[in-house]
Image (cartoon, helix red, strand yellow):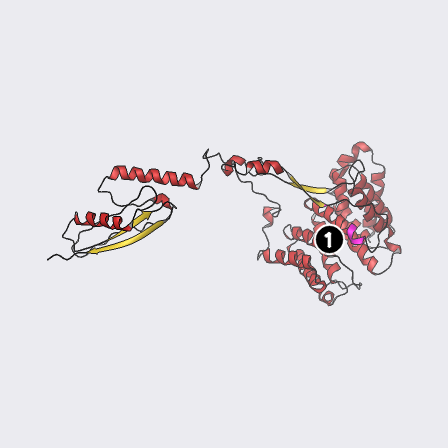
Amino acid sequence: MLGSERGVVEEWLSEFKSLPETHIPSYAGSLHLKKSLVSALYRVIQDPNNELLEPVCHQLFELYRSSENRLRRFTLQFLPELVWVYLRITASRDRQSNGCIEALLLGIYNLEIVDKDGNSKLLSFTIPSLSKPSIYHEPSSLGSMALMEGALCQHDLIRVVYSGLHPQRETFTAQNRFEVLCFLMLCYNSAVIYMPVSSYQSVCRMSSRLCICGFPRQQQKLWREPCNRVLLDPEFMVQMLAAVYHSIYNGEWEMGREALEDILYRAQLELYAQPLLLGNAMKNSLPGSPPDESRGRKVLQVEVTPTISRISISAITTASIRRHRWKREEADGMSGGEDSFNINDPDEGFSSGASNSSQPSGTKMSGGVGQRGGSLNSSSSLKKAITARFFSSNQNNPTITTSLSLHFGCGRVHTCVLQISHCWK
């Protein structure tokens, strides 16, 4: 560690201790601008034998205990690096140099599982009801909801708990280690949009190294520091994938994709179903080229559908469509009279196929039969009506071909083609 970096860290340690309460908001606003301090703190955390590690961990915990959210996020950005160092030292069975990092992780965990009053809290989200308006929709734009509105109002809003009650932990054990780490990564992912680029790089490095250390794949990497294999939990790998996915679309395309491949490599070796399913879905959904960074944080963009006014008061049902069709047919029958014999209803939804063809005589005849009421009495009466209609027409046409559209009560359309040939002596 360079002397300049050591001086920056020591100044930061003494600065916060002498800071009055009234100056904390302004201090929190300027803390994330100190890039040299962030890089120096990473150097301290990465070296377990550094004498500044213990006061730095204590200072990070004091920041996290404050009520200022920006100070809490400043500590949270180092969580991936802290987790990596803790698991690496745990795998090497050197517990003596791991005490301050372990205490910091447990302190953050115990603060997050309770609310401001010290009661255990549930992490949950609410499924909204379509019967109530939101920024995404208005019930009126969905048409008539008379059939479903009552049922939706009975259920009202549905609350889904995605992280239940967690007990207080005083020390890490083999049984509770990944329960605590999974919850900490869940807290990190809930605030990942506020993290700087350095934190995205850290979470990608952590994911890659935890998955390949001690395996042959490590020999293919530039990072070849000797390290024992680290046991991983599938739930913890899912949380790693969530952080890596956000990093891919927010400036860390290459490192994020490499971390994704390494996580899939480890999941295949361990035969973990959940990381394999999520990781392959992420891999197959990635674009062929890096996203345009000028568009900003692409993953979190939400397009709100504009609301529209209600078009119709009454609901559109099968019965209303049938009534509308009958009115159209009756209107066409009134205007056409006896000579109107063609039925082509555009509201029917089917192509009636009514077309006329003629022979060399050059005379065209068109005809159709429409039934009001939904059904035909008999086929013989239909044939008589057609024959009478054709013989009353121009008798110079030796062959007449016509297509008829027949409407039945069930709403279907049947088209039949009749060809009547008559030879005149």
Q: Is residue 357 rendered to the left or right of residue 261?
A: left
**Where is mark 1, residue-wise?**
202
| Quarter in which the N terminus is drawn | bottom right
Outermost residue, left direction?
425
Residue closer to the observer: 152 or 86: 152
Q: Is residue 206 visible?
A: yes
In this view, the residue farthest toward the top is 22
Residue placed at 23% from the left, 55% from the top?
419
> Which residue shows up at 24% across the image and 50% down it?
383
Q: At numbered mark 1, what does the secondary structure look like: helix, strand or loop?
A: helix
In the rendered view, does 19 fall on the left or right side of 162? right
Identify the amino acid type marked 1. Ser
Can residue 52 be seen in the rendering of this structure? no
Q: Position of residue 267 (x, y in %)?
A: 70, 61
| Most common SS among magenta residues | loop
Relative horizontal placement of residue 327, taking residue 304 as reference (left or right)? left
362 on left or right of 77: left
Which residue in the rendered view is the most extreme toward the right? 96
